[in-house]
Each structure stands twice: as C-alpha cells, then as structure tokens.
Image: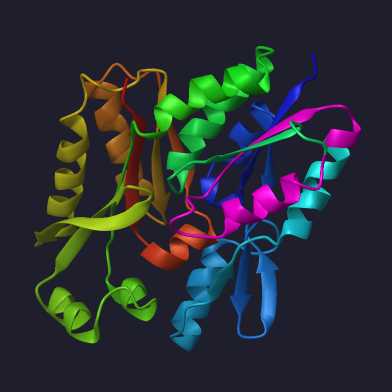
Amino acid sequence: MSRVRIFTDSTCDLSEELLQRFQIEVVPLYVIFEEQSYQDRVNINAQQLFDFVTHTGKLPKTAAPAPIDFEKAFAPFIEAGEDIVYIGLSSELSSTIQNAAIAAGSFPDGRILVIDSRNLSTGIGVLVVKAAQAALEGRNQAEIKAIIEPVIGKIEVSFIIDTLDYLHKGGRCSSVQAFIGSLLKIRPIVTVIGGAMQLTDKVRGKREKALNQLLQNALAFKDEMDTDFMFITHAQAHEEAAYVKQQFELHTNVKNVFLTETGCVVSSHCGPHTVGIVFAKK
C-alpha cells in the first residue's frame, strides 16, 4: 500500500508546528504588491502586508498558484511512490482547487485526489489535520476521502472583523457602509456559509461586546462540537485570542484548542485585529 501525503495551500493558516507534526505539505498562494509578486508564508507575512496597506492605502492582490506550481510541488512525492490528497481553499473563493485538479491530471490516474474544502483559513485546517491523522495511521486515499467528505458540511467558521477598511478597499462594502460602520462603531461578524463569506451579525459598540457575541455564538454549539480539537485564529489579536481559547477550555470538552495566526490571504480580506473561532460539529 502506498503512503499518502497530505497537501494543502497557504490559506489553511496552520502553524508551522502543526504542519511539521502532521507532515503536511503546503502550496503557497501569491500576494502581489504593485508589480512585485510574493509567496504567502514563504517570503511575506501578514505583518508586512499590514505595513504595506498602512503605507500605501491600497490592498495587494492575491492569486492562486498556477497548475505548474502544483505540478512542481506534487512531482517529488509521486516519484517517491507516495499518493497525494490535496485539500484546498473553497472553489467559491478562488481558482486554487481548479488549478490543483488541472495539475493532478498530469500524473497517472488515481495518484492525486483533490478535495474542495468549501472553506477558508483553519476551516480548511480542520479537514487537513483530520486527513493527516488518518494518513499517519496508514489509511489510503479512499479511506481518507470517506473520513473527510462528511465533515466538510459540519465545519463552523466565524470571524469578528475590527475594521471595515479592508472590506471597503477590497470592494466588499461601499464607502457609505464603511463610513457609517466606522461612525457607529459597527463590528461585523462574518461566517462561512456554502463555501463563501457572509455577514451574519453587526455588533454596535465596544470591541469586547462583539468578541463576546462571537464567543456566545460558538458556545451555543458546545454540546455538538467534535471534541478532538478546534482553532482560535487571529490577526494581531494575541490577547483576545488567548481569552477566547481560555473560555473554550473552561466551558467545553474540546481536548486541544489550538491558537493560530492568519496568513496574508485571509489577512488581506479581514484586516488586523481579526479573531476567528473554528470547529467541527459531530
């Protein structure tokens, strides 16, 4: 039986420690500042992205890896006799999945399985870690697929966004919406539904109020949570993320609550001081 190697892309927002622990390979997306192109998590990080936006007032563009990028990443493992399961960014948000599938077609049939996470950030990460656990246990592609596909629709991902500036710069809310939101101190909560980001709550007032709303929304599912692990994912919000982690450790039976930081792609959409809660339901 061939060993299975798990691949994902840089939007998974998994920490380097988790990537190494579970032997997960990452194909980076691109971040483009004016004419200069960088690879997410390779030669640019979220702090550098925020510095660029502060300095220029503009958002960088992001781009999916090309099929040739996937081919180059996959080839050494295929040549070493390993099969591959790739789990990537929602096809509703990017052409990343399509390009991975194109690349998979360049290899012998059945060697590479491409799974659309229908999610982003550590919503992908939950699926990737579960797949990697199964791979390390010696499961084959078909067995991993049977484990992962039923979980896709059970992932809950919600973020509190501290500022509407990044959504405005990215064309996801109007100037009027951004102005009114800033004036009224409205802090949106964004949830992944059907593979895309949707605004589900608008909390007016202090940041602590919005953070507690996000927390209570998630804790409403505490009896339905998969207790193996969950993620608290953030962008430059270390204290708040640590507080949310503590609350889940106090009020749920989840064995491992992992803290992770967003990469450039998610950061470019949500901005600094974002906090997200990500878990799977049973």
User: Is 182 in front, or is 122?
Assistant: 122
Q: Quadrant of residue 186?
A: bottom left
The span picked out in magenta is: 78-107
Q: How is the image coloured?
A: rainbow
Which of 75/258 is in front? Answer: 75
Residue 147 rendering spot, x and y as whole percentages? 50, 20
Residue 123 vs residue 52: left or right? left
- Residue occupying the far front of the picture: 109
Residue at 22% of width from left, 36% of height from top?
218
Name the spot of residue 277 as percent of width and height, x first. 32, 41
Vertical side of 179 occupied by 105: above or below: above
Where residue 207 sits in the image (x, y, percent)? 18, 58
Q: Is residue 82 magenta?
A: yes
Could you say where residue 182 lies in the image, as x and y percent from the top left? 18, 76
Q: Which residue occupies 48% across, 52% down?
A: 262
User: Looking at the rendering, in which quadrant would you find the C terminus?
Assistant: top left
Quarter holding the N terminus is top right
Q: Is residue 76 above or below residue 274?
A: above
For the question of whether residue 257 can be seen, the reply is: no
Residue 12 lies in the magenta stretch: no
Indicate whether 182 appears above or below 194.
below
Instruction: Name the residue located 65 percent from the left edge and 27 percent from the top edge.
Output: 21
Taking the image as shown, residue 69 lies to the left or right of residue 131, namely right
State whether residue 16 appears in this view. yes
Is residue 216 left or right of 99 when viewed as pictured?
left
138 and 189: which one is in front?
138
